[in-house]
Amino acid sequence: MIINRDYYLQKLINAKHNGMIKVITGLRRSGKSFLLFELFNKHLTDIGVDSAHIIKFAFDSQDYLDLIGEDLLELNLKKRKVDPVKFNNYIKSKIIDNKTYYILLDEIQLLDSFETVLNGYLRKSNLDVYVTGSNAKFLSKDVITEFRGRGWQIHVNPLSFKEYFEAFGKSKEEAYNEYAVYGGLPQVYEFSSDADKVKYLNSIFEETYLKDIIERNKVVNTNELGELLDFLASSIGSLTNPTKLANTFASVKHVKIHPDTIRKYIEYFADSFLVSTPKRYDINGKGYINSPLKYYFSDMGLRNARLNFRELELPRLMENIVYNELVMRGYNVDVGVVELYEQNGKGKSVLKKTEVDFVCNQSDKRYYIQVSYALDSEEKIAQEQKSLLHINDAFKKIIIVKDSMKPHYNQYGVYIIGLYDFLLNMNSLDF
């Protein structure tokens, strides 16, 4: 089944001929190659671009490597990358006139000296270049810096709930229940049985994501790395920090691991787009708080697979899904902190810190969002909106609730919207 990624395709279309290298990043198996080689390639042919002016090359494919006399097995055995001279000679042989050529390159990090190669293309006025890669540190940091403002990043996420829902035509409830368990990696849904989906997710986690992180970063203590992933997967949406995690290792696993090592491992997960770490922001104090932090998984299927589908706490899954949706929509997402005074049992005012699940910024827009699995009592409503009502500005305060209900403002000016209305409308927060 072809799943149209119209949101990302439009980003590529908008970026055409902008004089920059279009760097498409994202989690492995999230659909970057399909977006570039199939959907964007089709767009080019549909608008009349001659196929001879679309040059495609996948650096992890033997079929393409044969074109330049490279061997995938030999590259792996010798732990080397593709020869840039051979590749450049191939590209030169394809450019025979002054018309625009679209160069589509998949897994560019497998090409040796790729920064230098791509910088050379920037000097050719008739080349429009698009590349994909799977490592954040390798691409979105190093490459964009190397291009000095001439790299244009487009980040591709796994399927959003809206993309999944529209592709498979199930009821909203049935679609969400499946999406919350198996996530949004497109290939998952080529399997019809639950058992095969589980088998696929378990397999790619070990053989693709974890293996890739270990090999790329030369990790020696692989057991500790895996156990740290387990801890993070079990505690999505909970505050923690490397010191706390080190103490957990010592008390639960009887293993000593330094907080700096844990911090480094978490960076590896983030660099592979597996885990995301929003910052904490003191809303009224207008400053960032370094620790503790929350961690979210970029795909729920991978998170659940890591825990063998044992810990399917619906409120936590919902919070993670909302976070991923906000990030996909292009918001800068922080976790909010609000300080307020409350009476203790002895009648004294005590300063307390309360949380706002997400503070979302985009241009001149800001939203404060709480995520609630249910608002089934006045006490629950008061609990969820307490921190929102103590924010000293006029930006929109929102509660996203799992229950289906008509979006509305309550008597306190808080906008309440059901989860499906939020997920299925890209502009749902603007009403």
Image (cartoon, helix red, strand yellow):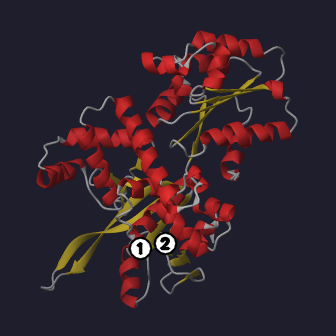
Asked if marks 2 and 1 touch (Cβ < 8 Å), the reply is yes
**Residue 14 point in image, percent of width and height:** 72, 42
Q: In the image, which disc is placed on residue 397?
A: 2
Disc 2 crowd rating (10 Å Cα; few below 14, some 14-19, many 20+) is many
> In x, y percent, where is residue 140?
50, 35
**Disc on the earlier residue, 2 or 1:** 1
Instruction: Count every numbered label the image shows and give the total.
Output: 2
Seen in the image, is 283 located left or right of residue 301?
Answer: left
> In the rendered view, does 337 fall on the left or right side of 155?
left
Query: Vertical placement of 320 versus 119: above or below?
Result: below
- From the top left corner, tell me how far across and down residue 353 is, in percent: 27, 68
Q: Which amino acid does label 2 sit on?
A: Lys
Residue at image point 72% right, 17% down: 124
Q: Is mark 1 on a helix, strand or loop?
A: helix
Local SS, label 2: strand
Residue 307 position by quadrant: bottom left
Q: Position of residue 36 (x, y in %)?
A: 67, 38
Task: Name the amino acid, label 1.
Answer: Leu
- Asked whether the viewer can see residue 79, the reply is no
Q: In this view, does 180 lie to the left or right of 160?
A: left
Q: Residue at x 51, y 81 (%)?
A: 403
Where 142 falls versus 323 (above or below)? Answer: above
The residue indicated by pointer 1 is 388
